[in-house]
């Protein structure tokens, strides 16, 4: 089988090659999939897509015309695929539902600690031989209330870690995790209560029509003044302009983002020598209490190996005429 791998990066290519085990012909491309680049999958049986590839109806039409049959995601999320159109075209889609919840959870905690203890500012000062401690006061995580929005695989790991810090943990999810309640004292509650009582709010929910902009102007107003907001899940969970207003009003005291709603075409690229055209993220970067990483929460050796292995498990199943367990049912 010939597989065109879109959005290839130096950090994942070696893992993909290893997981392939010389079985399939791989066509690595550093460009992202969209309607303009879909034609690059000429003569391929399958394509592999990453987080910011755009599998719109138009792009899928072109893939189908090229006789592509399979789409192997290298991510857990697949909201960047028009699943309805994929079903109409009889394109099979599979994802990587669990590659390393620890990687993302630990990154969320890292953002919390770095923001709280002002690690970036402190490091920059010392680099300039400024050893002053003015403006670097943080708070004890112990005893604080942390709200977790979404207690799936990643959110559950976050709960375990925060329990170790001695936090009181509130959670919001449509399905309660009984183990978190019994072993870690997690308290499930409604979203208004979680926002109103939490010193730290961390997002670990899927992006869909119900969760789009779940953090908006009204939700931010209901939060405790000076709240810390962390998002390592999906950029679309947060209305970024409302968050900027929250930062300006001091309602949000700390903001840590690993995802951004307009990250496509921005994250994973080097724009250090050009003018940044995105005014929204440019404004975010002016706040001293904001820490942004460019969708790197997943970026551990364990996660990269697991992503590659599951990607080629899916492709191998299709090649053998079987349906992989991770195939997405288009309804």
Image (spheres, grey):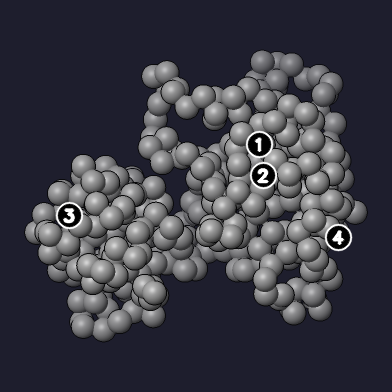
* Residue 276, picture quadrant: top left
Instruction: Using the numbered discs, state the Cα–Cα distance from disc 2 to disc 3 in whole angstroms.
Output: 36 Å
Q: Relative to 320, is 134 above or below?
A: above
Residues at marks 3 and 1 touching, judged by CB atoms closer than 8 Å: no
- Within the image, what quadrant is residue 71 found in? bottom left
Would residue 180 be found to the left or right of residue 42 on screen? Answer: right
| Label 2 packing within 10 angstroms: few (<14), some (14-19), many (20+) | some
Numbered disc in front, either 4 or 3: 3
Residue labelled with disc 3: 62
Q: Residue at x 12, y 64 (%)?
A: 67
The residue at which mark 4 appears reads as 168
Query: Sequence order check: which comes first, mark 1 or mark 4?
Result: 4
The front one of 294 and 277 is: 277
Alpha-carbon span between mark 4 and mark 3: 51 Å
Gap between marks 1 and 4, in whole Å? 27 Å
For mark 2, what is the residue?
A: 216
Residue located at (34% from left, 49% from top): 53
Labels 2 and 1 touching (C-beta < 8 A): yes
* Image coordinates for residue 78, horizontal then vertical, percent: 42, 60
Determine which of the numbered discs, if any, sits on residue 242 in the image.
1
């Amino acid at each position: 089988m010939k597989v065109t791998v879109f959005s290839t990066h130096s950090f994942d290519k070696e893992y993909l090659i290893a997981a392939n085990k010389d079985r399939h012909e791989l066509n690595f491309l550093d460009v992202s999939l969209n309607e303009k680049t879909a034609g690059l999958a000429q003569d391929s049986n399958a394509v592999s897509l990453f987080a910011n590839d755009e599998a719109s109806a138009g792009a899928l039409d072109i893939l189908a015309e090229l006789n592509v049959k399979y789409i192997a995601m290298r991510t857990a999320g697949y909201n960047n695929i028009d699943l309805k159109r994929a079903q109409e075209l009889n394109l099979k889609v599979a994802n990587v539902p669990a590659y390393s919840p620890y990687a993302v959870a630990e990154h969320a905690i890292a953002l919390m600690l770095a923001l709280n203890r002002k690690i970036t500012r402190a490091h920059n000062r010392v680099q300039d031989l400024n050893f002053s401690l003015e403006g670097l006061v943080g708070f004890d995580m112990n005893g604080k209330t942390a709200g977790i929005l979404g207690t799936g695989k990643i959110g559950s790991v976050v709960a375990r870690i925060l329990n170790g810090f001695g936090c009181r943990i509130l959670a919001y999810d449509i399905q309660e995790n009984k183990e978190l309640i019994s072993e870690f004292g997690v308290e499930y509650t409604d979203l208004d209560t979680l926002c109103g009582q939490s010193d730290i709010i961390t997002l670990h929910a899927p992006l869909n029509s119900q969760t789009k902009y779940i953090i908006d102007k009204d939700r931010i107003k209901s939060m405790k003044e000076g709240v810390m907001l962390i998002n390592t899940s999906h950029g679309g969970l947060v209305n970024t302009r409302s968050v900027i207003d929250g930062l300006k009003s001091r309602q949000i005291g700390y903001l840590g983002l690993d995802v951004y709603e307009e990250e496509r075409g921005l994250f994973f690229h080097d724009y250090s020598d050009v003018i940044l055209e995105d005014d929204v993220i440019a404004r975010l970067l002016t706040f001293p209490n904001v820490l942004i990483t460019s969708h790197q929460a997943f970026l551990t050796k364990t996660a990269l190996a697991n992503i590659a292995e599951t990607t080629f498990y899916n492709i191998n199943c299709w090649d053998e005429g079987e349906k992989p367990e991770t195939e997405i049912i288009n309804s």
